[in-house]
Image (tube, helix red, strand yellow):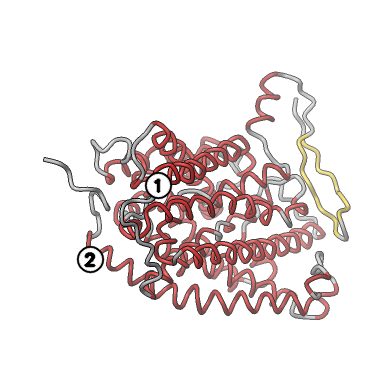
């Protein structure tokens, strides 16, 4: 029978309590389960980060390029990719700091998943916890909504016999099955497959655009309006803000102290997908993308395109689970079933979380513009401003810096360099991301409501032929 062993491991200058699965069973079922179901390695974390970071937004980046122009689009991807990696690093440092302090107090996390708001609570108090809980949950709620909208938007390009709203009903029911996936430990095979699927789609977009060639009279006017410029920039901010689940991914690792550079390496890989695909589609179709937020809508229907649509649908199901699982945890803790061993009981308790997501996806089916709105109003604080501020406040005192579990790398200039980086992130994201980005994305979002209305049956659908 499988047994669990908790062993104290000296790692760096702190003591880390780790749970490892030392299964002596050689049964086929045990091997199968370990291979496909129980993940906790560095590679599992990398696949989770990369797979979660590049999902449906891959299809909207060409739309952002048409708003920004080619040069600005490339620069913003590189810039926000690095900034996202930096704040993911900060989150990982705060997680290790919190967990180490708690385990020195003999707190056992074997039946408890640590979350970001608990890290803030343990290090900075209840007010920080409440702020973190609000922004994190709201962002993940709308992140799940976006995945559901993307499912309906994509399937329409294979089967337009049903409108997008009807497809949203159908995929809402399908995505509700994610309640049966216990934690991020159990996304091992899904993360791997998800990244393969987005890799195929990205290179399909790139190759198909070059083979298609430029449309007749193609124009590359961007940027032409400030509203569109900052809307596009904020969508890219959203693209590289997928680390709201960093704490949950780290907690699923056998050795979470090894996470530090995983997100950066994942981002580098993601850039090899997003830069060629967005550039190629924008080169081929230019300003046409301003009215087509989903890049697949402009490419001719072929077996390769249908394959990309199907693979993205599966991946969006996976990403829905990534975004929704932390919400499931919060809800479980709220109603007191988080530490139960009954998978069925937990799954049943999670179902109410899916209902508001389903409802919001039907009200606001604006694939593309909703990304920028969520990016400016929620992502800017959730994964950029709050982690940078929290890190500075946590280590504000000299004693906190002296006793820090992880010290800043010397090449950054020590604590002074680290604080300089954090201040830059806070100011930039607040002014450009939240300020200008919030203004632009809300103006664009309101225009979509004025043009299409809420509860629209088929957003950006071509008129049916008589």
Residue at numbered disc 1: 213
- Per the rendering, the mark at residue 116 is none
Which of the 4 quarters of the picture holds residue 65? Answer: bottom left
Which of the 4 quarters of the picture holds residue 217? Answer: bottom left
- Of 292 and 243, which appears nearest the observer? 292
**What SS does tag 1 mark?**
loop
Q: Is residue 441 above or below residue 210?
A: below
Residue at numbered disc 2: 450
Q: Is residue 15 above or below residue 125?
A: above
| Residue drawn 80% across the image and 60% down it | 105
Question: Image check: 465 left or right of 375?
Answer: left
Quadrant holding the N terminus:
top right
Question: Image check: 271 left or right of 437?
Answer: right
- Of 192 and 174, which appears nearest the observer? 192
Q: Residue furthest front?
A: 217
| Residue drawn 23% across the image and 48% down it | 462
Question: Image check: 437 left or right of 49?
Answer: left
Quadrant holding the C terminus:
top left
Residue 232 on image: x %, y %: 43, 65
| Residue drawn 40% across the image and 62% down it | 66
**What SS does tag 2 mark?**
helix
Mark 2 closeness class: few <14, some 14–19, many ≥20 residues within 10 Å: few
Give the number of callouts.
2
For residue 220, say whether it is visible. Answer: yes
């Amino acid at each position: 029978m499988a047994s669990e062993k908790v062993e104290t491991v000296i790692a760096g200058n702190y003591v880390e309590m780790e749970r490892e699965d030392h299964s002596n069973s050689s049964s086929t079922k045990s091997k199968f389960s370990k291979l496909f179901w129980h993940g906790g390695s560095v590679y599992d974390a990398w696949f989770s980060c990369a797979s979660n970071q590049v999902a449906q937004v891959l299809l909207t980046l060409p739309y952002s390029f048409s708003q920004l122009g080619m040069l600005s689009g490339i620069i913003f991807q590189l810039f926000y990719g690095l900034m996202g990696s930096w704040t993911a690093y900060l989150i990982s440092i705060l997680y290790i700091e919190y967990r180490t302090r708690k385990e020195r107090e003999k707190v056992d996390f074997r039946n408890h998943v640590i979350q970001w708001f608990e890290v803030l609570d343990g290090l900075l108090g209840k007010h920080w916890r409440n702020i973190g809980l609000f922004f994190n949950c709201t962002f993940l709620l709308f992140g799940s909504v976006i995945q559901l909208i993307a499912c309906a938007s994509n399937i329409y390009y294979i089967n337009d016999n049903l409108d997008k709203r009807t497809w949203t009903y159908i995929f809402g029911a399908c995505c509700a099955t994610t309640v049966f996936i216990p934690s991020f430990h159990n996304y091992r095979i899904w993360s791997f497959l998800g990244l393969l699927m987005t890799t195929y789609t990205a290179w399909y977009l790139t190759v198909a655009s070059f083979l298609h060639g430029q449309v007749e009279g193609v124009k590359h006017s961007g940027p032409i309006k400030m509203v569109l410029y900052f809307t596009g920039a904020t969508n890219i901010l959203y693209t590289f803000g997928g680390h709201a689940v960093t704490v949950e991914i780290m907690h699923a690792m056998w050795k979470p102290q090894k996470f530090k550079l995983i997100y950066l390496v994942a981002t580098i890989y993601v850039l090899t997908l997003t830069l060629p695909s967005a550039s190629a589609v924008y080169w081929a179709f230019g300003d046409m993308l301003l009215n087509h937020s989903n890049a697949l809508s402009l490419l001719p229907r072929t077996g390769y395109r249908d394959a990309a649509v199907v693979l993205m649908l599966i991946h969006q199901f996976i990403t829905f689970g990534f975004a929704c699982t932390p919400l499931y945890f919060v809800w479980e803790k709220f109603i007191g079933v988080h530490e139960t061993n009954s998978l069925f009981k937990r799954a049943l308790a999670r179902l109410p979380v899916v209902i508001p997501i389903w409802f919001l996806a039907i009200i606001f089916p604006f694939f593309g513009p909703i990304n920028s709105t969520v990016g400016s109003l929620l992502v800017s604080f959730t994964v950029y401003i709050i982690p940078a501020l929290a890190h500075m406040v946590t280590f504000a005192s000299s004693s906190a810096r002296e006793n820090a579990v992880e010290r800043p790398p010397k090449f950054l200039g020590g604590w002074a360099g680290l604080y300089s980086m954090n201040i830059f992130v806070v100011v930039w994201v607040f002014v450009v991301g939240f300020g200008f980005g919030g203004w632009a994305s809300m103006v664009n979002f309101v225009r979509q409501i004025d043009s299409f209305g809420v509860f629209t049956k088929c957003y950006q659908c071509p008129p049916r032929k008589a």
